[in-house]
Image (cartoon, rainbow, N blue to C red):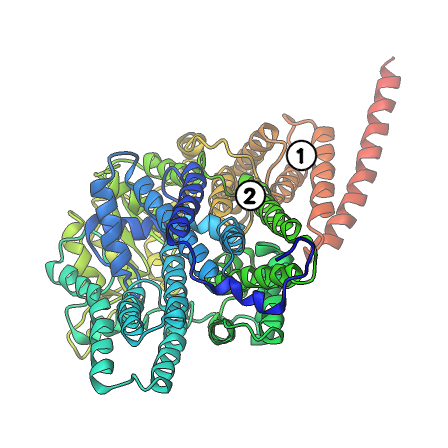
């Protein structure tokens, strides 16, 4: 072609010519190398929050993780623990997940390149997805999401290869490989099943049109698919062996296996039991807005442009694009229907948003196609072919650079030991030979990891409150908890013997047969069972509480000395994103600083004691609050209110050993500070009225002091 001439429209299809396989493989490896370098540089160094501690512990013990079991992840994590010669147990699994994330990125590059015929488009799609905050965050922590991303990208790459196959033999080979990985992918995260169903029907319909669909072909595809599901036998083997100190469920029976596989304890096809989320429409709107922030409006715009140009230009990628679009729509609508968590709450948003990565992958692939079709169209309409080519690459580099620079500081977890320190502080604060009754994912999973995987505090026994209500828990776990007695088969507020012979016991009975050990609850106690109140009390112990027999006399001074410096916590208050487990751990540690003061104040308000004892308890609470608040400028907002109330009680007591002007000044200062921040408190008007009254009292007191001073002079 002579210089300056416009290329004919037919050249648009040149994107789909057979690529240089050597160059493609080199670029795929380079994408893997670059992404893995960034991920490995920013890995969590220890146990993250959420399910990570439980997944690591299940793998370490060769037990079974929470439903649906994640057998593939468990086995691969155990191999990583055994084969990697560096880092803690948690770090090795974090490293493995970073590896999964980097492989997913390279597969995403390959899939987009093969679909679009453009290297820059593949790199754009891979870069936008891999360095989005969401993907990055969950590719550097021990979680199942990066492995799910790998399978999604792999199945999309195989789908593109299947569409481009030129012979029946090649299509047969790819479809059988795909069938195996479809089955294998379901051994990890079940949300991928919607993509798997869409792909299976698309492939079968394609083969039907090509007259290549035979009974033998379908049987062999089914055999390959079933072969991919074989890791689920691990659940049965682990349950039969019953050697794990931590495991979930009893898969030795068909019913037990299906209960676990179908997540019946969580609610099949739901994220949680007894929770209510937004409507489908509201959830979809929230997802789209979240996507705008996470993978940028550029990706969304290019994806829409790709869909439009694909049909306008009658591009050969239309069948695959239609499939990917159906996958995106089916998954997004179904998940929005079943995601029954209120994502207006930051922590629940953090749980739900992870599942949006599966949708984001499709949008990133379509955005890469959009860039390729746009530049291909421009190249046919301009005299400067090279200029468009350079702009395409410059645009790609700038967009990815923006993703990296925007999210690096947020996603760099290389010095994040928050959850690890949270768990260590709790473990090492406990007296010898205690029993800790765990409640919730944060303390449960993090303490289990340190106790079982790193061998900390072997003298302590960990018992899970929620798990004790399941039929399988005590038969599986109690043999591995020495010197803790269980007076039945399952914890239930109502003690009875069921028709199947199961004996239930309440908490009071459990406490009575374990009087030889101190028992702590962390964090909080199961609300459904009040039986313990007849024989025990809860005394504060940092973030936890000790169950103390009622015949024990509370010595305030002694308890203050025991709990004053339980934890060595240096994290600044409010420094973490509220949707993260780091924020929850940090908040628990900060609130622990005033739990003894709060308890003593409540005791002074409610206990049947003499006026002198009540006076002294109020004084202890006031001194504790003052000590803690004076040591920290930035602290939880409720501290202002609690300290102000403690000051107000001291004003009522008219103690001669405390300056009343200081008490008035502190009460006003902290009530005022609280009312400015906590605008939604239904007591705010009363607090403001009290502040006005106290200010008048302060003025009167100062006038009185000046008058007395003048009289003396």
State the residue in front, 624 or 20: 20
**Rendered location of residue 673, percent (x, y):** 71, 41
State the residue in front, 660 or 242: 242
Q: Which mark is residue 159?
A: none
Which residue is tagged 2?
A: 404
Can residue 550 be seen? no
Query: CA separation, marks 1 and 2?
Result: 61 Å
Residue at 51% x, 57% y is 118
**Rendered location of residue 184, percent (x, y):** 27, 65
Mark in the foreground, 1 or 2: 2
Residue at 47% x, 40% y is 589
Drawn side of residue 116 relative to residue 638, left or right: left
> Which numbered disc, 1 or 2, marks the residue that appears first in the sequence?
2
**Mark 1 near mark 2, Cβ–Cβ under 8 Å?**
no
Quadrant where the image shows the N terminus: bottom right
State the residue in front, 582 or 68: 68
Which residue is tagged 1?
A: 654
């Amino acid at each position: 072609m002579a210089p300056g001439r416009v290329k004919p429209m037919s050249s648009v299809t040149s994107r789909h010519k057979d690529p240089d396989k050597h160059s493609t493989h080199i670029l795929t490896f380079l994408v893997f190398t670059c992404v893995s370098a960034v991920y490995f540089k920013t890995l969590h160094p220890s146990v993250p929050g959420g399910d990570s501690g439980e997944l690591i512990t299940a793998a370490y013990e060769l037990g079974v993780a929470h439903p649906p079991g994640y057998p593939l992840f468990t086995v691969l994590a155990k191999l990583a623990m055994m084969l990697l010669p560096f880092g803690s147990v948690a770090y090795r699994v974090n490293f493995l997940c970073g590896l999964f994330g980097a492989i997913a990125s390279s597969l995403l590059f390959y899939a987009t390149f093969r679909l679009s015929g453009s290297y820059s488009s593949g790199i754009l799609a891979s870069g936008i997805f891999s360095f989005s905050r969401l993907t990055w965050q969950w590719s550097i922590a021990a979680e199942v999401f990066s492995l799910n991303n790998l399978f999604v990208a792999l199945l999309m790459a195989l789908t593109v290869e299947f569409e481009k196959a030129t012979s029946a033999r090649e299509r047969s080979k790819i479809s059988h490989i795909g069938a195996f990985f479809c089955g294998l992918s379901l051994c990890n995260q079940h949300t991928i099943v919607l993509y798997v169903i869409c792909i299976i029907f698309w492939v079968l319909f394609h083969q039907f049109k090509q007259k290549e669909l035979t009974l033998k072909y379908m049987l062999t595809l089914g055999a390959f698919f079933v072969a991919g599901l074989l890791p689920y036998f691990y659940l049965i083997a682990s349950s039969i062996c019953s050697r794990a100190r931590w495991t979930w469920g009893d898969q030795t029976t068909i019913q037990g296996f299906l209960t676990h596989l179908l997540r019946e304890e969580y609610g099949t096809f739901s994220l949680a039991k007894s929770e209510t989320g937004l409507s489908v429409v509201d959830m979809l709107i929230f997802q789209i807005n979240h996507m705008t922030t996470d993978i940028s409006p550029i990706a969304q715009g290019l994806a829409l442009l790709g869909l439009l140009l694909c049909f306008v230009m009658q591009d050969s990628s239309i069948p695959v694009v239609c499939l990917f679009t159906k996958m995106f729509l089916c998954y997004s609508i179904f998940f929005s229907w079943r995601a029954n968590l209120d994502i207006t709450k930051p922590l629940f948003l953090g749980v739900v948003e992870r599942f949006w990565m599966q949708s984001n992958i499709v949008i990133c692939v379509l955005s890469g196609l959009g860039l390729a079709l746009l530049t291909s169209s421009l190249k046919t309409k301009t005299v400067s072919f090279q200029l468009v080519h350079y702009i395409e690459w410059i645009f790609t580099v700038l967009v990815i650079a923006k993703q990296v620079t925007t999210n690096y500081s947020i996603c760099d977890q290389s010095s994040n030991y928050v959850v690890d320190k949270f768990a260590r502080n709790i473990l090492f604060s406990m007296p010898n030979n205690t029993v800790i009754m765990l409640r919730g994912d944060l303390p449960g999973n993090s303490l289990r990891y340190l106790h079982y995987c790193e061998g900390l505090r072997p003298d302590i026994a960990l018992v899970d409150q929620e798990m004790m209500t399941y039929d399988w828990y005590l038969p599986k776990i109690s043999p591995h908890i020495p010197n803790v007695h269980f007076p039945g088969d399952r914890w239930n507020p109502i003690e009875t013997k069921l028709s199947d012979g199961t004996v239930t016991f309440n908490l009071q009975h459990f406490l009575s047969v374990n009087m030889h050990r101190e028992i702590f609850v962390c964090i909080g106690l199961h609300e459904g069972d009040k039986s313990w109140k007849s024989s025990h009390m809860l005394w504060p112990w940092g973030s936890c509480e000790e169950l103390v027999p009622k015949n024990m006399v509370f010595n305030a001074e002694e308890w203050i000395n025991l709990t004053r410096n339980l934890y060595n916590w240096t994290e600044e208050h409010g420094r973490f994103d509220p949707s993260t487990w780091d924020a929850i751990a940090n908040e628990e540690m900060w609130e622990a600083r005033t739990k003894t003061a709060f308890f003593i104040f409540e005791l002074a308000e409610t206990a049947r004691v003499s006026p002198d004892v009540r006076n002294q308890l109020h004084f202890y609470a006031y001194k504790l609050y003052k000590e803690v608040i004076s040591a920290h400028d930035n602290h939880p907002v409720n501290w202002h209110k609690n300290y102000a109330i403690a000051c107000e009680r001291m004003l009522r007591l008219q103690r001669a050993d405390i300056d009343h002007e200081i008490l008035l000044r502190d009460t006003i200062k902290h009530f005022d500070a609280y009312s400015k921040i906590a605008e939604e408190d239904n007591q705010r008007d009363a607090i403001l009225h009290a502040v006005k009254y106290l200010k008048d009292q302060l003025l009167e007191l100062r006038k009185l002091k000046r008058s007395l001073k003048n009289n003396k002079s």
